[in-house]
Amino acid sequence: MAKIMKAVRLEAVGSIALREVDKPDIGPDELLVRVEACGVCGTDRHLFHGEFPCTPPVTPGHEFSGIVEAIGKSVSGFAVGDRVTGDPNIACGRCAHCHAGRVNLCSNLRAIGIHRDGGFAEYLALPQKQAFILPASLKPTHGAFCEPLGCCLHGVELAEIRPGSSVAVLGGGVIGLLTVQLARLAGATTIILSTRQASRRALAEDLGATATVDPTAADVINTVAGPAGLAPGGVDVVFECAGVRETVEQSMRLARAGGTVVIVGVTPQGMKAEFEPFDLLFRELKVLGSFLNPYTHRRAAELIASGTIEIDRLISRQVALEDAAAVIANPPAPGEVKVLVVPHPG
Ligand code: NAP
Ligand code: ZN
């Protein structure tokens, strides 16, 4: 068996390239995973630009799935040949937040693809406690969506959507489009998506949005919450999934009195947004942050394995490892939703 493999290495901020490296040695509690697909996420681009802390050199890629090729000697419950997805976020299990069951807030959180080598490689080492089995029959590319779906699932659960609820989703990237699908599954009957690109609005309508808004062509607040709007007085739940000031500010005004705002989008650190505390108080808004995927990865995997979530239409293109560094170093192309890196094509 070859001891050398190809991996995309972030060597320093602004420096990323395909390299030949040693195939990972696995510890007793780890699986060696032959990567089938790994999604490119905005965070990978932030790492490249130095906008998100990490410790290069490292192989990025935290949205991965693949086939178990070898197992450490203390591993149980996994076998060579299993298809697995990995939750990249490793909580320490011993800090006050972990002990309180808030593993996403762990003081010593370490992530595969950020602090240790991830999925933009032929192989990766995956601790067994982060691994979840997927059906052998699943399309190899679909497992890469468990991590982003798990993050959306956390947001939807925090929002406590009830059957018949009305929902607005701001931002039609992969996170917004997965949230639209989860809101529909949770029983929302009005689901409004605001995003600028027409192709994403059309896709959202196919995936369960009952209406879409072009924020460059219409006043979003009036179109949604105005007296003659799509949800007069506002919606029960707003998901901010764009991570820009404009949508953060809109979200407070789109929620109905007594409604809930869930901030999912990652705004640049230090960015400020304006809201009126009086309005928040007078209309008893609930404003929640939703961070990562605590205890949702297994259910995300179940949703994907069952075919309940449309995945194929979210995949804009698949690229080989040779092209991954360029994809990460450049902004997404117009219309693109998710690019997958497929290390072993064919
Ligand atoms: P994305 O592809 O960049 O999607 C965000 C989209 O928002 C943009 O592509 C853009 O689409 C849209 N947008 C920008 N300005 C807008 C505006 N003024 N009004 C309406 N829409 C606007 O990113 P993503 O992968 O879907 O992720 C979405 C956000 O969630 C990011 O900030 C990401 O970092 C964050 N995230 C958070 C978590 C978590 O745990 N909380 C996990 C994963 C990702 P158009 O060009 O169509 O407008
Ligand atoms: Zn911890």
Image: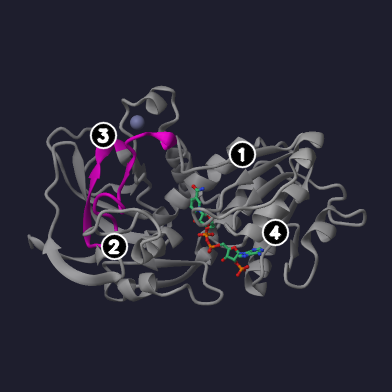
**Helix, strand or loop status at disc 4:** strand
**Sequence-wise, which precedes: disc 3 or disc 1?**
3
Going by the numbered disc 2, the residue's amino acid type is: Phe
Q: Determine the residue positioned at 65% across, 46% down.
A: 183
Going by the numbered disc 3, the residue's amino acid type is: Gly
10 Å crowding of disc 3: few (<14), some (14-19), many (20+): few
The answer to which quarter of the image holds residue 171 is: bottom right
Residue 20 is at least partly visible in this image: yes
User: Which stretch did the figure color magenta?
Assistant: 104-129
**Cα distance between the residues tagged 3 and 2:** 26 Å
Tell me the quadrant of the picture where the N terminus can be found. bottom left
Going by the numbered disc 1, the residue's amino acid type is: Leu
Distance from mark 4 CB to nearest ligand 1 atom below 8 Å? no
Task: Judge depth for marks 3 and 2 and give the one in front.
Answer: 2
In this rendering, is residue 82 above or below 173? above
Task: Judge depth for marks 1 and 4 and give the one in front.
Answer: 1
Image coordinates of residue 4 in percent, x first then y, are 10, 64
**Residue that label 2 marks:** 120
The answer to which quarter of the image holds residue 322 is: bottom left
Q: Quadrant of ligand 1?
A: bottom right
Tell me the quadrant of the picture where the C terminus can be found. bottom left
**Cα distance between the residues tagged 3 and 1:** 37 Å
**Sequence-wise, which precedes: disc 3 or disc 2?**
3
